[in-house]
Every structure is written in C-alpha cells, then in structure tokens.
Amino acid sequence: MSDVTRDISTTESHLQPCRPHHHGELPCNKDEEDEERRHFHQVCNSYQQYATFHQVTEQGVNHRRGRLLSSMNAVVEDGGPTVESILQKSLSQHQMKKNNELFCQATIRNQYFLDNVLKHCGAMTSQEVLRYRNEVEAFEVEWTTEDQISKIDSVLKSIYRDWSIEGREERSVVYDKLLGALDKYLPIRGNDDAVMNNSTDDDFDNYNDRGPPRVAVPGSGLGRLAYEIYAKGYSSQGSDFSLPMLLASDFVLNGCSGTDPGSHRKFAISPWIHETKNVKSLQDRCRTVVVPDVVAAVEPSDDGELASDFTMLAG
C-alpha cells in the first residue's frame, strides 16, 4: 500500500471517520493510485463472495467424501472399521440436509456482518452485486481466491478475540500486561499513585502540560488494544497494513453505535466455519459469538483538560 491513509479519528473523545488524506508532501502518482484502487476492489470482492466461496467449498468436500464412500468396500479382510462404517452416520441423507442447512446459516450470518462493513465503507454489498449481475448482460465475474478468503477468515477470528465477551480471556493475556505497564511507566496526570520511572518532577509537569501522553500501537489489527489505551485517557494511534482488517475496525469503531445513548448494534458471527482441526462436529465450527461487546466511544471530558484523541492509520 502507498502512503495514502484513512484516519478513523476521535477529536475531543468523539469517534468520527475522516476522509483519506496524504501526510506531508509524499508523492502519489497515477500508478500508485491505480494499484490502491485495484487492491480495494480485490478486498471488497472477497468480502462480497465470502458466503458463496465457503458454501461451494463445503459442497466440494461433501462430494469428494461421497465418491470416496462409493469406491470403498464395506468390509475389509481383518474385520476392522471401514470408511463407510465411520462416515455413514454423518452422511445419511437426513444428516447431510441438516448439516448443509446449519453450515449455510453460519455463512449467511458472517456474510450479513461483512455486508454491513461494506455498506459502511461505501462499497456494494453481496446482494447488491448479485442484483447488478442479473441486470447487466454479459457481466463477467471476477472470482476471489482462497488466499483472499483466508484473510477474511482471519478478520472474523480477530473480531471474536478483540470484540467479544468470549475472547476476553484470550486477549487479556497480553493486553492487561501492556495496559499495566502504561500505568506504571507513563502515568496520566491525576493518577496520584503512579510515578514516572527515571523522570524528574519537571519532566512530569512538562509532559502533562503537552496534554495526555501519546501512544502508538503498530499492527493494531481490529483496534481493541488501541481503543483500550484511549479509554484510559491516553492519545492513541493504531496502524495496520491489512486493508481487510482496517475496513472491519472502521466499522466496529465508527459504525456500530446505536440510536440511543450508550447503545450499540450487535452481530452474531460464526468465526470458525473454515476450521477442520480440533473440532468434534460441524456444530463446533458453526457456533456463534456476539460482537462487539462494548460501544466504542468515551464521554468527552468536562474538566477543561486537553482531550485525548484516537486515530487508526493504514500503513
């Protein structure tokens, strides 16, 4: 990606999306702009085709499994288990229909969330693309790749870790230690029990006079750690190279606020539908979590102090 960035910013503790802009006088020629446009199109394409890709992939797996069964003998010489004896229960017509319905429901849940991300960033949703294809003659579909879909799978798993109640234990292993280190070594004015490490009183006063301490969070992904730092009163700036991650973090941080104060929109997702290891059944792959677990906003300060801010950058 070039140095064109999208700010997902807060001023005076209000989260507001900003338009893309250049930092400084860095050049951006036509080739770079075209590359940015192509990359954005590829990412949106993978978002739009997510459910279709996984449904077709699962159908292919089931078809190959059926062919394997039909080519195997039901009895082996040593009387041990056969492929048919192991898989026959899961491959009964009734069970196959139930499994297909369960899997399709999981992909539709995920696609609904991804369509909301697309709508928030101004791109066409999967349903809008489908209607467009039906209206335009000789429409040529540019199919996404397995590599692109794997990045969307990673986005959904990261959303589970960073923005769900169930993911709290996993993320706290790292996040709590980092937040504790900030309290200890970079305290905010008003924390009487915090002492700056290896700093004089003059240094402490000077850095507080400049406003809240500024903290950079490189590789911030879905932005939860950067947001938690901001919520503690710091000025926080997250950054990430992954456009799929940045689109999702923009939506979670700026697009999930509800109509009532303090409320927020919630989505049920199934982030493990692509997993084939460490699962006992299809139900394990299709189980749901609700995201986000909190509304990503902080009330503005009324005590006259310099307000903290929160930005997310691409790059």
Image (spheres, rainbow, N blue to C red):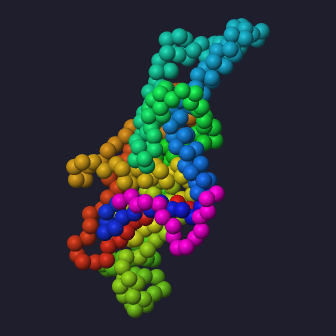
Q: In this orientation, which residue lies closer to the viewer: 295 or 126?
A: 126
Front-lying residue, 286 or 308:
308
Query: Which corner quadrant of the image does residue 299 belong to?
Result: bottom left
Residue sitting at the far right: 77
- Residue 211's quadrant in the figure? bottom left
- Outermost residue on the front side: it is 137
| Residue pictured at 53% horizontal, 35% vertical | 50
Quadrant housing the C terminus:
bottom right
Specify whether residue 172 is in view: no
Residue 131 in sight from this viewpoint: yes
Residue shown at 24% from the left, 48% from the top: 259
All told, the count of numbered labels is 0
Of the pair 89 and 96, the residue shown nearer to us: 96
Q: Is residue 57 left or right of residue 123?
A: right
Nearer to the camera, 132 or 151: 132
Image quadrant for the N terminus?
bottom right
Does 17 appear above or below 131?
A: below
Q: Main secondary structure of the magenta part?
A: loop
Q: State the image coordinates of residue 91 (x, y, percent, origin top left).
A: 57, 15
Q: Residue at x 31, y 66 (%)?
A: 13
Residue 243 image offset from top left, x and y in percent: 54, 52
Q: Is residue 35 above or below residue 199?
A: above
Q: Position of residue 150 (x, y in %)?
A: 59, 41
Write the start and end of the magenta stretch as one range.
16-31
What residue appears at the point 26 percent right and 70 percent down from the top-left corner? 301
Q: Examine the structure image and report whether residue 23 is included in the region drawn in magenta.
A: yes
Question: Is 281 situated left or right of 233 in this image?
Answer: right
Picture coordinates of residue 236, whole percent (x, y): 43, 68
Please say whether residue 179 is one of the residues in the magenta stretch.
no
Q: Relative to residue 188, is residue 78 depicted above or below?
A: above
